[in-house]
Image: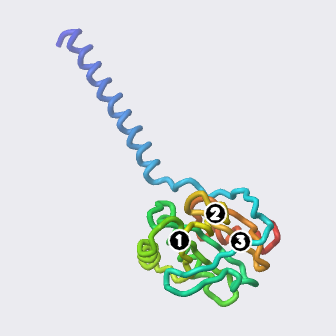
Amino acid sequence: MTVQDVKRTRKTHRARWISLAALVVAGAVVAVLATRPPAQVSEVDTPLLGKAAPAVSGTTLGGGHFDLSSLRGRWVVLNFFASWCPPCQQEEPEMVAFAFHHRQVGSAALVSVVYDDSTSSARSFLARSGATWPAVVDPDGQIAVDYGVRGPPETFLVSPSGKVLVHLDGAVTESALDHWLAAAERGET
């Protein structure tokens, strides 16, 4: 083997190692991005904080009638969602778990409002997830406007006296809901 052959072999090996290292780094970046949780839910300031919650009244996906005032005296988690919304799809199992763990009489109630979605799509979405709480249809978007919702998912915590205490933007988890509920019960919101 000549000196030039040895140099060429070294360059080839070095190029292979560099390519392999770049491939490993790219694979690691893809793995991190594919498996990391989406952006965390964040508390958002709203002019509604500390004020009476706007009315939520209307027909539910189940065909009944719902009025938020019927839950006066209970903590209410009010969630705006849409079946086409990926973060809503991500948070739905968390909402189901929250509702299940708060199913006893007098515990926090969960209520959803359909945001810019067809009734049939929203109904199918909630049925697939096992949701059993009221979901109010908002055909003209007025409920969302009254709450200042820009896009789903957005969640509000309403006190037993009917005041908005927390506004969360993004996909919530059961533990995050429990955290905000406990903080509100302690008067820390």
Furthest residue toward front: 140
Q: Dot 2: within a 10 Å radius of its alpha carbon, few (fewer than 14), some, or many (20 or more) residues?
A: few
Residue 125 marker: none
Q: CA distance from mark 1 to mark 3?
A: 16 Å
Q: Earlier in the sequence, mark 2 or mark 1?
A: 1
N-term mark: 2 or 3: 3
Q: Quadrant of residue 124?
A: bottom left
Q: Residue furthest left?
A: 1
Residue identifier under label 3: 54
In the visual, does 74 lie left or right of 24? right
Q: Earlier in the sequence, mark 1 or mark 3?
A: 3
Identify the element where label 2 is drawn: helix
Residue most toward the top? 3
Q: Quadrant of residue 24?
A: top left
Q: Position of residue 58 (x, y in %)?
A: 59, 80
Q: Is residue 116 left or right of residue 155?
A: left
Q: Secondary structure at mark 1?
A: loop
What residue sits 69% from the left and 58% below the top? 43
Q: Are marks 2 and 1 in contact (CB under 8 Å)?
A: no
Which residue in the structure is indicated by mark 2? 145
- Taking the spot 55% from the left edge, 68% from the top edge, the residue there is 140
Name above or below for residue 39 compared with residue 76.
Answer: above
Percent coordinates x, y for residue 65 in the rendering? 58, 86
Q: Closer to the observer: label 1 or label 3?
A: 1
> Where is the C terminus found, in terms of image quarters?
bottom right
Provide residue 77's location: percent of width, then percent of height: 65, 74
Residues packed near mark 3 inside 10 Å, few (<14), some (14 to 19) or many (20 plus): some
Looking at the picture, does residue 119 appear above or below residue 84? below
Residue highlighted by disc 1: 139
The quarter of the rendered structure image containing the N terminus is top left
Number of other residues with Cα within 10 Å of mark 1, as a class: few under 14, some 14 to 19, many 20 or more: some
Residue type, numbered disc 1: Pro
